Image: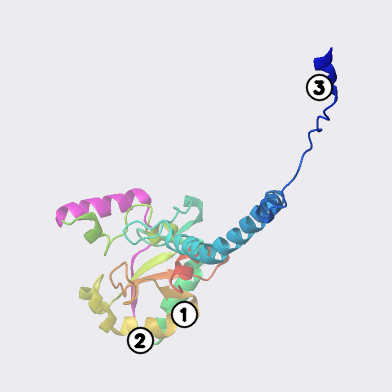
Amino acid sequence: MELNKDIDQFDIPLAKRTYLNNPNSTLLKKLLIFSPFLFLIFSVASLRFIRNVELIPLNNLKFQVERNHDARILGHLPYNETPKEKLVLIEPNIEVHIDMRDSLLKMREAAKKDGIYLVFLSGYRSINLQNNIFYSLKSIRNQEAAERARVSAPPGYSEHSTGFAIDIGDATQRETDFEAEFENTDAFKWLIKNAPKFHFKLSFPKDNKYIDYEPWHWRYEGSIEALKVFEISNRKSQI
């Protein structure tokens, strides 16, 4: 009993929670509270920076891909074969698209009045015929496809299959048929000056980087259908 009495005589202090006024601890708490907001701000700023630095070059790259992706094979653009019902015979074994018949014949008559005698060498060619021309001549001449394509389109890639292309020669100088020397004839000089009046255009001039110069090869662009057919070709030539 005395022991307990002695114990009761001492005041046992109560436990108290104390906080140290640590400035570093306060800063840490603030950082923890605001860290989500800081992270959000940093993320937005980073995204804007990446977009400014990389987005424009990526857009330019996409534009370049779209420009270059024109489905060429060995330098030639693809063309659909015109339906048979749209073809008309203008001379034995020479058919052309009905849209260009009148302009073609009028052009020949106009040249004749000027003392120039145009001869039509080749018009519409089916894809099957173009297949035979491309592969048989390639074999005969022992040429690789890329070399042969400089002077003859692969099947499905010839303007002749549209019916809007015509090969023209000079009736007084037949030795220049399908030859670059055709450019020296009176017929070619007349065509250069007058063919546009009849909506004809030289398809493969000297500055064509894919296909050899063909002064005899002309195409018609005097109808909506013809313009649609050659729209890609004309657009690419302006790039």
Give the percent coordinates (x, y) of residue 109: 43, 79
Give the magenta part as a residue range. 117-142
Name which of mark 2 and mark 1 comes first in the sequence.
Answer: 2
Tag 1: amino acid: Pro
Give the percent coordinates (x, y) of residue 57: 49, 65
The residue most toward the bottom is: 114
Location of the C terminus (image quadrant)? bottom left
Q: Nearer the viewer, residue 186 or 69?
A: 69
Give the percent coordinates (x, y) of residue 176: 23, 75
Q: Is residue 98 above or below residue 237?
A: above
Residue drawn at 71 percent across, 48 percent down:
20
Seen in the image, is 99 located left or right of residue 176?
Answer: right
Q: Are marks 2 and 1 in contact (CB under 8 Å)?
A: no
Residue 8 location, quadrant: top right
Q: Are marks 2 and 3 in contact (CB under 8 Å)?
A: no
Mark carried by residue 115: 2
Mark carried by residue 196: 1
Seen in the image, is 51 located left or right of residue 81?
Answer: right
Q: Nearer the viewer, residue 174 or 154?
A: 154
Q: Is residue 122 magenta?
A: yes
